[in-house]
Image (cartoon, rainbow, N blue to C red):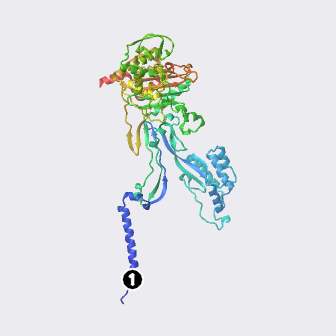
């Protein structure tokens, strides 16, 4: 018998076939046809999730970690959720909530009176969350959870007699360290900045504030945009084979500093012991390569443990009133160390030569004031070498007058005075040097500025300027960052020249003069056996409002470099208001030698005779 088919069966069959073809076609499209950018559209992505970025690391020149990140937790307790759970399962009451808070007080060591009062108040307010810890460790979170589990063991289980007829769904219970809720208790993981070496190089690094997660002071502030990543709200792709095309958080780039952490630690130890010995209020020691501008060490005191920057004992440092966070970039009246640059200008301009004789009568009048030497005496006929050796104010004031205002201040500008060096640290002071054409400038300042009074410069500015003398006339820009590492790519910062303020001949002549003068009686404490060094002391008087320069308060300093024929190190030492002696020759010069000896060992610089012999053999 012939069977007749109803047209409806045919239509249904056609629909099923069409649906099957569409499913297969979509599978093929997802596998091979969809363009990568299409996966970023909402139609092809899943639920949004917050992806946290990591701040870039900071390491020293040898890869030692100076600033990194750890995972910390913000832990909160929701009284409202606990009460809801109590209503649903009848196992958590006010007494047990109180136990949870007491555990939190003990484990997280809560001492704030306002927080303690809130956590111990009863009845508790219906609040979504009460923070019990802001930046705590995984270990403390796990300890907190262990105690909560002990409390929970006494809670009656759902579906017992006292819960008959209630929903038998188990309350959510997961590990807090995975940042999931556990019966009204929540944790939020976050990256927190950590400085594993505590005080080491803290004045260079600065810190990241927990309040705004941004860098403050030092490298952290100056390079915040480079170090800081971008958190992103991302969606997981439905297609597991294309998951690597989803947008990941933009992690911050890492920095490689020029600092040698071993040398930094040694220099900080020398600085701290020297401060205790000479009674200075503060100080700095900088070690730089005058040929590259690399800062090997930059010690400043007082210092703070930037892991705990909020502590009251660090307030005067962190608040950074008058740039006290890092004395290496703080401006001050340098005194006699700047005589090096006045003499460099005079030699370069042809005003004097090393054998020019000046008759020192003990005083020199300029612009209506009388300048006298540091000891008040007259030294008689003095060559320019002797003027430097005896650090004669009268002689250098005369040299400045021979140069004239236009030439002297043009050289000062060429040396970088009154300008930031761009070393790579936040809050660097530009210093103060008046314009000789301004209405508030007086001719007497031509004399006082010539020997470092009445101007303000920073130690790092002086290092930059004097590098022209040490480096054959070429001045280099100091730098604290050696390289940037961005997503695996290594970008080395270039060594940059800051120009040629003096000729090579002038640089060599002045270096020889300073080599001779440093062998004098006043400088012997700075000499390094086996190595040729050049340098100059500085004793700058400190102006006191209402008193002028009449006190015994001074800035004692020394700048020197070596070996002079091929300089690998330049060292600047500055002590603020020493009490054991006011003179740079007695306070700062011996410290230069201590630091130089450590630098020579660390950089493995052979003695002059060995090094020169090796050069002859090659």
Q: How many marks?
A: 1
The outermost residue toward the bottom is 1
- Circle 1: element type: helix
Q: Residues within 10 Å of mark 1 (few under 14, many from 20)?
A: few
The structure residue drawn at horizontal position 45% and vertical position 50%, both measured from the top left corner, is 249
Residue 405 is situated, as x and y percent measured from the top left of the image, at: 42, 21
Relative to 322, does residue 190 appear above or below in the rendering? below
User: Looking at the rendering, in which quadrant would you find the C terminus?
Assistant: top left
The outermost residue toward the left is 618
Res 303 visible: yes
Relative to 303, does residue 173 appear above or below in the rendering? below
Residue 38 is situated, as x and y percent measured from the top left of the image, at: 39, 59
- The residue that mark 1 highlights is 7
- Taking depth in this image into account, of 595 and 225 the one nearest to the observer is 225
User: Looking at the rendering, in which quadrant would you find the N terminus?
Assistant: bottom left
Residue 13 is situated, as x and y percent measured from the top left of the image, at: 39, 78
| Relative horizontal placement of residue 607, taking residue 80 as reference (left or right) | left
Instruction: Report which quarter residue 548 is drawn in.
Output: top right
Res 519 visible: no
Instruction: Report which quarter residue 82 is drawn in.
Output: bottom right
Relative to 123, does residue 446 appear above or below in the rendering? above
The outermost residue toward the front is 439
Residue 558 is situated, as x and y percent measured from the top left of the image, at: 47, 22
The structure residue drawn at horizontal position 56% and vertical position 47%, both measured from the top left corner, is 139
């Amino acid at each position: 018998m012939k069977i007749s088919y109803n047209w409806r069966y045919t239509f249904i069959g056609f629909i099923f076939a069409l649906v099957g073809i569409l499913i297969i076609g979509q599978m093929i499209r997802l596998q091979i046809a969809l363009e990568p950018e299409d996966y970023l559209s909402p139609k092809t992505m899943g639920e949004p999730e917050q992806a946290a970025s990591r701040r870039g690391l900071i390491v020293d020149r040898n890869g030692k970690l100076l600033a990194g990140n750890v995972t910390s937790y913000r832990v909160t307790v929701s009284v409202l959720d606990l009460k809801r759970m109590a209503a649903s399962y009848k196992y958590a009451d006010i007494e047990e909530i109180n136990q949870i808070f007491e555990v939190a007080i003990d484990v997280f060591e809560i001492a704030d009176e306002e927080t303690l009062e809130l956590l111990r108040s009863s009845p508790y307010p219906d609040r979504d969350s009460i923070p019990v810890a802001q930046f705590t460790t995984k270990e403390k979170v796990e300890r907190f959870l262990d105690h909560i589990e002990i409390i929970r063991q006494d809670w009656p289980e759902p579906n017992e007699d006292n819960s008959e007829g209630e929903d038998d769904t188990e309350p959510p219970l997961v590990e807090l360290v995975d940042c999931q809720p556990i019966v009204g208790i929540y944790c939020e993981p976050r990256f927190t900045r950590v400085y594993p070496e505590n005080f080491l190089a803290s004045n260079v690094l600065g810190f990241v504030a927990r309040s705004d997660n941004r860098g403050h002071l030092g490298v952290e502030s100056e390079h915040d945009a480079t170090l800081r990543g971008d958190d992103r709200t991302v969606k997981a792709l439905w297609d597991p084979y294309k998951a690597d095309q989803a947008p990941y958080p933009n992690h911050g780039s890492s920095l490689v500093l020029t600092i040698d952490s071993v040398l930094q630690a040694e220099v900080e130890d020398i600085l701290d012991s020297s401060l205790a010995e000479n009674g200075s209020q503060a100080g700095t020691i900088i070690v730089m390569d005058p040929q590259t501008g690399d800062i090997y060490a930059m010690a400043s005191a007082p210092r703070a443990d930037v892991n705990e920057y909020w502590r009251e004992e660090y307030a005067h440092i962190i608040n950074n009133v008058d740039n006290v966070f890092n004395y290496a970039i703080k401006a001050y009246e340098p005194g006699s160390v700047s005589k090096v640059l006045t003499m460099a200008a005079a030699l370069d301009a042809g005003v004097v030569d090393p054998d020019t004789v000046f008759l020192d009568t003990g005083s020199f009048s300029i612009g209506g004031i009388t300048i006298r030497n540091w000891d008040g005496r007259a030294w008689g006929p003095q060559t320019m070498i002797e003027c430097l050796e005896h650090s004669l104010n009268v002689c250098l004031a005369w040299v400045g007058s021979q140069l004239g205002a236009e030439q002297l201040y043009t050289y000062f500008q060429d040396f970088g005075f009154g300008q930031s060096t761009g070393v790579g640290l936040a809050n660097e002071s530009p210093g103060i040097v008046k314009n000789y054409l301004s209405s508030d400038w007086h001719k007497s300042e031509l004399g006082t500025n010539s020997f470092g009074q009445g101007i303000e410069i920073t130690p790092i500015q002086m290092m930059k300027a004097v590098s022209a003398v040490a480096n054959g006339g070429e001045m280099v820009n100091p730098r604290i960052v050696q390289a940037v590492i961005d997503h695996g790519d290594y970008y080395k910062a270039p060594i940059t020249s800051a120009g040629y303020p003096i000729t090579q001949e002038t640089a060599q002549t002045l270096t020889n003069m300073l080599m001779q003068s440093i062998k004098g009686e006043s400088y012997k404490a700075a000499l390094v056996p086996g190595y040729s060094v050049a340098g100059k002391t500085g004793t700058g008087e400190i102006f006191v409002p209402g008193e002028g320069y009449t006190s015994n308060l001074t800035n004692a300093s020394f700048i020197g470099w070596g070996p002079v024929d091929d300089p690998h190190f330049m060292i600047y030492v500055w002590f603020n208001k020493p009490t054991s002696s006011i003179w740079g020759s007695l306070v700062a010069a011996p410290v230069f030698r201590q630091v130089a000896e450590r630098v020579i060992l660390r950089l493995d610089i052979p003695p002059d005779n060995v090094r020169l012999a090796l050069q002859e053999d090659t």
